[in-house]
Image (spheres, rainbow, N blue to C red):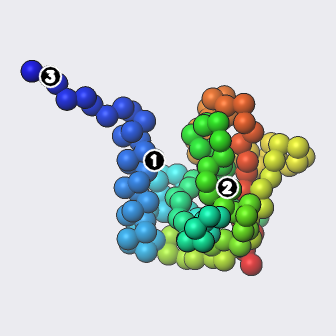
Amino acid sequence: MKLPTLPSQRDVFLKTLDVHQAIYEKSRGVLGHRLLAGMPTLLLRTTGRKTGQTRTTALVYAVDGGRHLVVGSNGGARRDPAWVLNLEADPEVEFQVGVRRTPATAGVVRTDDPDYERLFALCNKANRGTFAKYRTRTERPLPIVVLTPR
């Protein structure tokens, strides 16, 4: 008798993130602001650069003054996540923290910016050190996205 294959740890993690985002969206933000371990999470809405459709992604965030910060880590993959490419094509976005939706302009901060490391440290702290681990998995610099309310 052949035993069924169990999903990988990565597959379970990705499915958990999908369920978290679905709860956040279906509850209209009443549930979902805090990710599993209490990390703050927002919903970022971008416009698909190819489809023109709204795309929503749940992301851990940090705050710097009146701005929200997210990192395009893509789990340390070789490529930036699609949402970064979308906001580079159209920086007019919306983010949601809890039940509050905020229109914003997104700007990408790259490693040559003198403020990059300070912003990265804020984001990494919010994500309990995970972004630093992702940074070791790739040669790609992890973009920081600054969401400035309009």
- Which numbered mark, 1 or 3, is in the foreground of this view? 3
Which of the 4 quarters of the picture holds residue 25? Answer: bottom left
Q: Residues within 10 Å of mark 1 (few under 14, many from 20)?
A: few
Lower sequence index among marks 1 and 3: 3
How many C-alpha atoms fall within 10 Å of the one at disc 3: few (<14), some, or many (≥20)? few
Q: Please report contact status of discs 2 and 1: CB closer than 8 Å, yes or no.
A: no
Q: Which mark is residue 6?
A: none
Which residue is under mark 2? 84
Determine which residue is flagged by label 1.
37
Q: Position of residue 12 (x, y in %)?
A: 36, 40
Q: Distance from label 3 to label 2 (Cα)?
A: 42 Å
Q: As rendered, which of 80 and 123 lies closer to the eye?
A: 80
Asked if the residue under mark 2 is in contact with the one under mark 3, i.e. CB atoms within 8 Å, the reply is: no
Q: Say which residue appears at 16% left-offset and 24% top-offset.
A: 3
From the image, which quarter does the C terminus lie in? bottom right
Q: Which mark is residue 2?
A: 3
Nearest the camera: 5 or 99?
A: 5
Instruction: Give the Cα distance between marks 1 and 3.
Output: 36 Å
User: Which of the two labelled residues, at mark 3 and mark 2, occupies the earlier sequence position?
Assistant: 3
Give the Cα separation between the discs numbered 2 and 1: 25 Å
| 4 to the left or right of 18 | left
> Mark 2 or 1 closer to N-term?
1
Q: Which amino acid, by three-letter code, is at mark 1? A: Ala
Q: Quadrant of the N terminus?
A: top left
Q: Where is residue 131, by image quadrant?
A: top right
Q: Position of residue 48 (x, y in %)?
A: 60, 65
Q: Is residue 124 visible?
A: no
Q: Is residue 59 visible?
A: yes
What residue is shown at x 67% (from left), y 31% (from top)?
Answer: 138
The 10 Å Cα crowd at callout 2, few under 14, some 14 to 19, many 20 or more, is many
